[in-house]
Amino acid sequence: MSVFLPELKYGLDKLNPFLSAKAMDFHYNKHFVNYVNAANAIIKGTEYDSQSLRTIVKNSSGALFNNAAQVLNHEIFFNSIAPRETPVPPQVEALICKNFNSVAEFKEQLFRVASSHFGSGWTWLVLDPATRKLDLRNTVNAANPITEGLAVLLGLDLWEHSYYLDYQNRRPDYIKAFLDHIDWTYAERHYLRNTAK
Ligand SMILES: [Fe+2]
């Protein structure tokens, strides 16, 4: 099986009050697990069975794309957050400052971009590996910028299932709380992975 549920690096109760244990339990053990199971049911016995998750996402469409991409999207999201925001590694801070002037301004822009998104989808911090420029992108439903040749350094889940139990209609509060729980080490890892010669 190519598609599997990644273990979380923190307990389901460790993000409270940003995300309660109950909300995390539904998000991880129900929604995430369902995407994994649905993707595996579709690829069973097909050429996709031996491919990596990222390859499947780049090469599939329809129901397989939707479920496989949602597995990748959630893997990125759950790795983009931490019980407490981590220090910004110097190399990432320099990159953020070059593209957004400061970490504070980056957060303001992320808040604006994510708040402007309508409906279910995602906000991403993306890197163009060719130019090493950073940008913020919204995508709808399951779409992921890796299909456009971009690398993803951070991801924010904007589907209602990610915040409704804790925030109901207050999505801006959820986005603000996300900004205080970023795991910058994930962004650094993926920056280095996508710029290695
Ligand atoms: Fe989600």
Image (cartoon, rainbow, N blue to C red):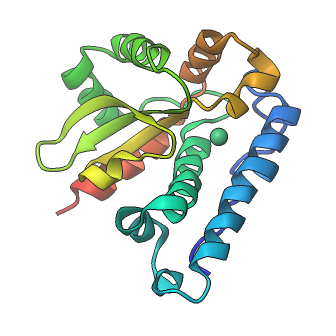
Q: Does the rendering let one see residue 5?
A: no
The residue drawn where x is 81% and y is 52% is 29
- The quadrant of the picture occupied by the C terminus is bottom left
The residue drawn where x is 82% and y is 42% is 26
Location of residue 50 with respect to 65 vertically, above or below: below
| Outermost residue to the left | 131
Left or right: residue 187 versus residue 24 is left
Q: Nearer the viewer, residue 140 or 23?
A: 140
Left or right: residue 131 versus residue 114 is left
The residue drawn where x is 76% and y is 27% is 19
Residue 108, by quadrant, is top left
- The quadrant of the picture occupied by the N terminus is bottom right
Total numbered circles: 0
Location of residue 121 with respect to 73 vertically, above or below: above
x then y, percent, for residue 119:
54, 25
Location of residue 147 with respect to 50 vertically, above or below: above
Q: Does the rendering let one see residue 104?
A: yes
Q: Nearer the viewer, residue 117 or 94?
A: 117
x then y, percent, for residue 51:
45, 79
Q: Quadrant of ligand 1?
A: top right
The residue drawn where x is 22% and y is 60% is 196
| Outermost residue to the front | 62
